[in-house]
Image (cartoon, coloured by chain):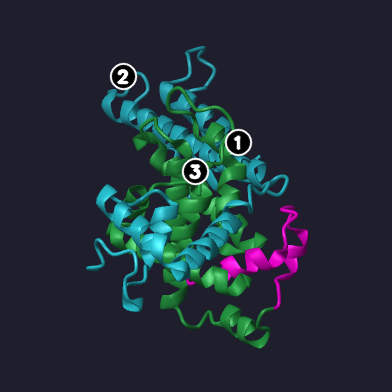
Amino acid sequence: MKVRRARLRHGAGPSGVPSWEEVARRHGDFIYTVAYRLTGNRHDAEDLVQEVLLRVQRGLPTYRPGSMEAWLGRITTNAFLDDVRRRRRRPSVALPEVFEVVTPGAPPADEALDRDGLPSHVAGALKALPEDYRAACVLCDVVGLRYEEIASALDVPVGTVRSRIHRGRALLRRTLR
Amino acid sequence: MTADGHGHGPAREHLGDELSAALDYELEPAEATRVEQHLDGCAGCRAELARLERARRTIRELGPVEAPPGLVDGIIRRRQGATRRAAALVGVAASLLVGLSLVAVEPPPPERPAAAPEPTLVRSDAGFVRLESTPRRHRDGDGSDPSFADRAHDAGQELLEFLTG
């Protein structure tokens, strides 16, 4: 079974450290793609892109030329997980959960607008994964990071990464059947 | 994990997350050998590997999504506006500081004992910060140049107009 990593590529690699605006324009679609896979809906993805670009502006002075997309994927995933943790700490924001309980399996309205041309149940299945599994799977299969890079991005052992990716895929294949 | 050397391990030795790691080429050589040996003799694990491969491919094939038009431009525009306003505020503060320090350091000219009025930042009702000072006494028609404090005051006013206008 031959599976070579297919990394998403948008634009040419920068020769030095690019300006914040260059990063935003050149990699905006990439950040949005990762944000959309993580959040599963347009509204949250747009908010996440805004937060990521703020973090990029703050972090750019310390960015060392390398894989810009790996760096951005890492920032996006951490911003997403930070937001998830913040929401968990505030149980008063229970509306989304209630909504999901009331309409189990109903695809979000904005998935009809998804330009993937793929069945919306795929995106829905990804969205149904626990956030930790989803984050590991997205970093692996959307951003294209190695397990070690994911472990460093999420600050967990490589064994944990391996287990989360496996459980994520195992859940996905059950949902997609 | 002691199924080494056996192609036909008992059911409890079936593979778990090694399968996903194998798909990602993330197995150490020794582990890869063991997994291959197990797969050779275990149809159940081969089927599971195929199902996991489909799930993995499904995520990868979701592909890139274009950001909604105007999203990135809007964020850039808002950030630039915020940065420009912050820079201009720093400019106002700097010109005020320079002006005030000159006033403080410079001894008043003997023929004009009154020191230049100190411009002060005042928050108006409308919420704008304005520079206010008592009428300037240097421009009393003697043809002398306005003091540095006056010029700093004028520059500050211009910046404030830029900020609020």
Q: What element does badge 1 sit on?
A: helix
Neighbor class of circle 3 (other Cα within 10 Å; few <14, some 14-19, many 20+) is some
Direction from residue B113 to residue B141 in the image, left or right: right
Q: CA distance from mark 1 to mark 3?
A: 25 Å
Residue under circle 1? A25
Tag 1 and tag 3, C-beta contact below 8 Å: no
Bounds of the magenta segment = A106-131
Q: Which chain wears green?
A: A
Shade of chain B as shown in the rendered figure: cyan
Nearer to us in this view, B38 or B58: B38
Return the chain for callout 3. Answer: A
Distance from the alpha carbon under mark 1 to that under mark 2: 60 Å
Query: In the depicted view, which residue is nearer to us: A154 or B111?
Result: A154
Up the image or down, A119 lies above or below A94; here it is above
Question: Which of B79 and B96 lies nearest the eye of the viewer?
Answer: B79
Residue at numbered disc 2 = B110
- The residue under label 1 is which amino acid type? Arg
Where residue B25 appears, as percent x and y from the top left, is: 39, 48
